[in-house]
Amino acid sequence: MEISPIGTLHTPHRELASMPIQPKGAKEVKGHALLLPEYADGLRDLEGFSHIYLIYHFHKATRTELTVVPFMDTRPRGVFSTRSPLRPAHIGISIVRVTRVEGNTVHFTGADMLDGTPLIDIKPYIKNFDQVEQSTSGWMTADEKTVSDKRSDDRFV
């Protein structure tokens, strides 16, 4: 099975190092998803949603590791318990805030991905489907400010 991009994500992030590691750390960072023209009709009615999931390909990930030391920890962890780009399929996901939809472009804030990232899919965030009232975060114990302030280094380059 081959998955082809539906468009490209454009952000101010040109280098992997020093990027926000999650949308929380990029709350006001603007970006846009430029879809291929043939997918523009799929954006109809999206502007009614405050947030969307962007599903994308970590196109600069050159290797796969089953154990990684994540940005928010100092111990090796199984890749599937992290948000590391070094996962086998190199798939990333971010929840971003939609600011407007114009033609084949979705403008958003919360841009934590590298400029030029291939976009695989867009899905609406739906509170009644997606919000989990009682959840746990495993080994990840950092508070919201620590997560917001954390920036990437070269460990996943």
Image (cartoon, grey):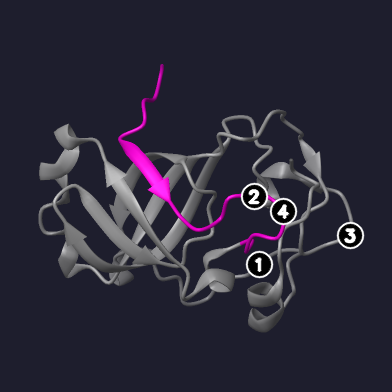
Q: Is residue 4 left or right of residue 141?
A: left
Q: Nearer the viewer, mark 1 or mark 3?
A: 3
Which quadrant is home to the N terminus?
top left
Q: Give the residue pinned by disc 1.
A: 137
Q: Nearer the viewer, residue 67 or 154?
A: 154
Q: Where does residue 18 sit, x and y in percent of width and height?
A: 70, 60
Q: Give the residue pinned by disc 2.
A: 15
Identify residue type, mark 3.
Thr
Say whether marks 2 and 3 touch (CB < 8 Å). no
> Which element carries disc 4, helix, strand or loop?
loop
Q: What is the C-alpha distance between the residues marked 3 and 4? A: 18 Å
Which quadrant is home to the C terminus?
top right
Q: What is the C-alpha distance between the residues marked 2 and 3? A: 23 Å
Structural crowding at the residue carrying mark 3, measured as other residues with C-alpha within 10 Å and reported as few (<14), some (14–19) or many (≥20): few
Q: Give the residue pinned by disc 4.
A: 17
> Which element carries disc 3, helix, strand or loop?
loop
Numbered label attached to residue 74: 3
Say whether marks 1 and 3 touch (CB < 8 Å). no
Say whether marks 2 and 4 touch (CB < 8 Å). yes
Q: Nearer the viewer, mark 2 or mark 3?
A: 2
